[in-house]
Image (tube, coloured by chain):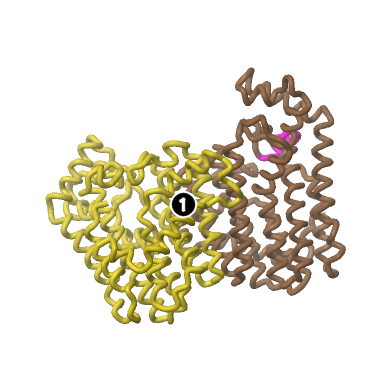
Chain colours: A brown, B yellow
């Protein structure tokens, strides 16, 4: 399965990985701590966004000189937002490893995140494509607007599916969409193909985030690499929580938790059990599957490429993942 | 004096100011708090960096369509770093006003800073110039590398002038240089003129930061809009502190402060008095004047433009400023 997903771009993905580990603009790794921070945060990722850039670039003029820096840029943009997110959430672990803020403190996490932002911008500009740079800047704007929205809507029980969707598009799907759209643009894809690939990234990103939000309830601490119910603890209302509130308006553990009523841990445990034991789990799973199918629906209109099979397999794996 | 400095670009500077206050990508100001944060942080600045972009663009093909977004971009990049800096330093006031972190907390300051980064990147891309975007990304990398350096060298007494210079170039002068260089590039200046204007920005930025660091000792709390001796409190070794350490190796208040010996406030007061009452003040002032003169030395080789007088006056005002 993994072979199919990586498929024709496997070697270039290894090159992207090497680019990320050799990151040292301005000789900044003269500082041993800074090297340690970089390897801490750049290790262990699934490199999903680079994978999307490379596959999307594999339908017309596959151009590694532009696609590789863009792929590295997409991953760094992602990682920089993780570093800041973890600092904001005071998270201890990410992908099962200690976070930058938990080892070096919030201040260093802010600075390191900024530095990674800078590196990602630098790499995007290396594509020499003003269109790709604009897509990059647009994704960054969407991500941080999504962050602002999330930050201002925390602990707010009065949210609907539309707001949730807007938030996860900003937070996650816009970067997936940027990855596939820049891949298409940098390989000189015609506009209708750009649109198909951008749509793939967007819908895949939504499916990915719905699964992420569901796994936060139904996964195990070991699978997640962080505590179960982390989102609720941060006051973030995700799809499963939305459904709990909708279905049990009169009284439910999410409302109680946000209103500070009852024991925190019992409320979280109750919410987790509710998602697992009712139709909520299947409804969320169905939502993710719908978006995953939506993502793939027009891929058949692209020219023949081994990357079609990879993109289909990736969408399929998305709704089967456990971490 | 102010008339000469603003001179021919005064009206466009007002337009840049208007662009900054109308900032609302992604409809983010639907959130009242987010509007309040934006106006809190965007008010009261001197708009030095936009001024540099516009003047530097006023020697060849002055093109407001490119220069205005670049000018706004430079200011936003600056402001975004201030928001993060204040969060890291836990500063209460900036320009005499409460900081974002002091009102809304560190978390919101991280998110707002990221959002302003995004806006500045977006505006830089609006110039449609890949060269300008690369300069922008380079400046961002320099700034954050400078931040990382500062962060890892805090409370380190074993620093020389070279390290200090490297740090202030990264932190301040690289953005000044980017402002004048992009202004030149976006107005189709020939390479020798680009070099002259870039050099102006770089040297002016060094002079500006030396003055800033001196004022932190010799200014009043009212002039500075923040407490006197703030840098020392953050463990940042600036030029006056370097000179204190050099001149009084055996025993001095900076070393004592960093080593946690004696009363904090007395050490700071003693250091402030030392700078004011010895030749240190004049030496720093002389350093700033030298760089300010260096900045202007080749301006005479540029074609005639009313902006030459403005740039000369600006460099002159730099070493006379009190805030």
Q: Which residue is mark 1?
A: B80
Q: Position of residue A309 (x, y in %)?
A: 84, 61
Helix, strand or loop at disc 1? helix
At 63% from the left and 64% from the top, the residue drawn is A70
In magenta, the rendered stretch is A215-225
Q: Quadrant of the N terminus of chain B?
A: bottom left
Q: How many marks?
A: 1
Give the camera-side residue of A26 and A289. Answer: A289
- With respect to residue B104, does A174 lie above or below? below
Q: Position of residue B4 (x, y in %)?
A: 28, 66
* Parent chain of label 1: B
Q: Position of residue A305 (x, y in %)?
A: 83, 68
Determine the residue located farthest toward the top in the rendered image. Answer: A262
Query: Is residue B175 something one can see in this rendering?
Result: no
Give the camera-side residue of A222 and B22. Answer: B22
Binning the other alpha carbons within 10 Å of mark 1 as few (below 14), some (14 to 19) or many (20 upward) gives: many
Most common SS among magenta residues: helix
Whether residue B141 is in magenta: the answer is no
Give the camera-side residue of B27 and A205. Answer: B27
């Amino acid at each position: 399965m993994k072979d199919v997903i990586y498929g024709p771009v496997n070697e270039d993905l290894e090159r992207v990985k090497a680019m990320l580990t050799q990151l040292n603009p301005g000789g900044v790794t003269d500082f041993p701590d800074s090297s340690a921070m970089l390897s801490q945060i750049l290790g262990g990722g699934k490199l999903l966004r680079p994978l999307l850039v490379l596959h999307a670039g594999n339908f017309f003029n596959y151009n590694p000189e532009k696609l590789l820096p863009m792929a590295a840029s997409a991953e760094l943009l992602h990682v920089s937002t993780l570093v800041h997110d973890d600092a904001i959430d005071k998270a201890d672990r990410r992908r099962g490893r200690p976070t930058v803020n938990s080892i070096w403190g919030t201040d260093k996490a802010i600075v390191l995140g900024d530095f990674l932002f800078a590196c990602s911008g630098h790499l995007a500009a290396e594509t020499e494509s003003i269109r790709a740079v604009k897509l990059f800047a647009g994704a960054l704007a969407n991500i941080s607007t999504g962050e602002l929205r999330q930050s201002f809507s925390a602990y707010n029980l009065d949210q609907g599916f539309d707001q949730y969707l807007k938030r996860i598009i900003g937070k996650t799907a816009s970067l997936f969409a940027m990855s596939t759209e820049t891949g298409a643009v940098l390989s000189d894809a015609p506009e209708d193909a750009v649109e198909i690939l951008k749509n793939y990234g967007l819908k895949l990103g939504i499916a990915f985030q719905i699964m992420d939000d569901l796994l936060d309830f139904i996964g195990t601490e070991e699978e997640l690499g962080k505590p179960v119910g982390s989102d609720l603890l941060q006051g973030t209302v995700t799809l499963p929580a939305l459904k709990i509130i909708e279905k049990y308006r009169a009284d439910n553990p999410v409302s109680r938790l946000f209103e500070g009523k009852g024991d925190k841990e019992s409320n979280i445990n109750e919410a987790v059990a509710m998602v697992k034991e009712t139709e909520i789990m299947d409804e969320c799973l169905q939502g993710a599957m719908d978006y995953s199918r939506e993502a793939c629906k027009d891929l058949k209109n692209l020219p023949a490429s081994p990357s079609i099979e990879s993109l289909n397999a990736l969408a399929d794996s998305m709704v089967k993942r456990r971490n």
